[in-house]
Amino acid sequence: MTAQHAEHDGPIISKPALTLPALRQAVATVAPSRLTEFFEDMQNTFVQAGDEDSVVPIRMFYRRWGVVVEIERHPQTALRLHDAERSMDSEDPDVREQAIREIGEIVRAAHREVEGG
């Protein structure tokens, strides 16, 4: 499945709405191995929102997972991110520095896209 995604140039799913059902389905499609993390984060977020009597944690949850989906729905972008994450383990400080720049670029671009930019 990953090999097929790596060859695909465009997004593998449409950009989901920032709602719980849409994000849950998107995560299940583009990053199924992260569903447990999604549900744990969701549970913690809703507890935090109740404790704080605020919807801000919920909005941040939607945004955080919107960014994950934005990256993962673009196979080439996801591949670049995961390669850079693995490069963080390098003993070479130049390799790590380049990985940090690459990760930052990818994540910032995904945030801009999620924000509607």
Image: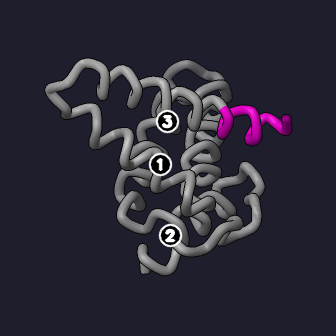
Q: Using the rendered view, name the quadrant where residue 54 is placed.
A: top right
How far apart marks 3 and 2 lie (CA) works out to 32 Å
Which residue: 54% across, 29% down?
50
The reply to whether dot 1 and dot 3 touch (C-beta < 8 Å) is no
Callout 3: 10 Å neighbours few (<14), some, many (20+)?
A: many
Estimate how packed mark 2 is, as few (under 14), some (14 to 19) or many (20 or more) residues with alpha carbons within 10 Å. some
Q: Amino acid at mark 1?
A: Arg
Q: Quadrant of the C terminus?
A: top right
Residue carrying label 1 = 80
**Of the image marks 1 and 3, the number of the one nearer the N terminus:** 3
Tell me where residue 37 appears, x and y as whole percent.
37, 51
Where is residue 80? Give x, y as percent.
Answer: 47, 48
In which quadrant is the N terminus drawn? bottom left
Please report contact status of discs 1 and 2: CB closer than 8 Å, yes or no.
no
Give the mark, 1 or 2, whose residue is nearer the N terminus: 2
- Range of the magenta residues? 109-117
Which residue in the structure is indicated by mark 3?
45
Q: CA distance from mark 1 to mark 3?
A: 29 Å
- Tell me the CA gap for discs 1 and 2: 10 Å
Image depth: mark 3 or mark 2 in front = 2
Q: Secondary structure at mark 1?
A: helix
Residue 6: which numbered mark, if any? Answer: 2
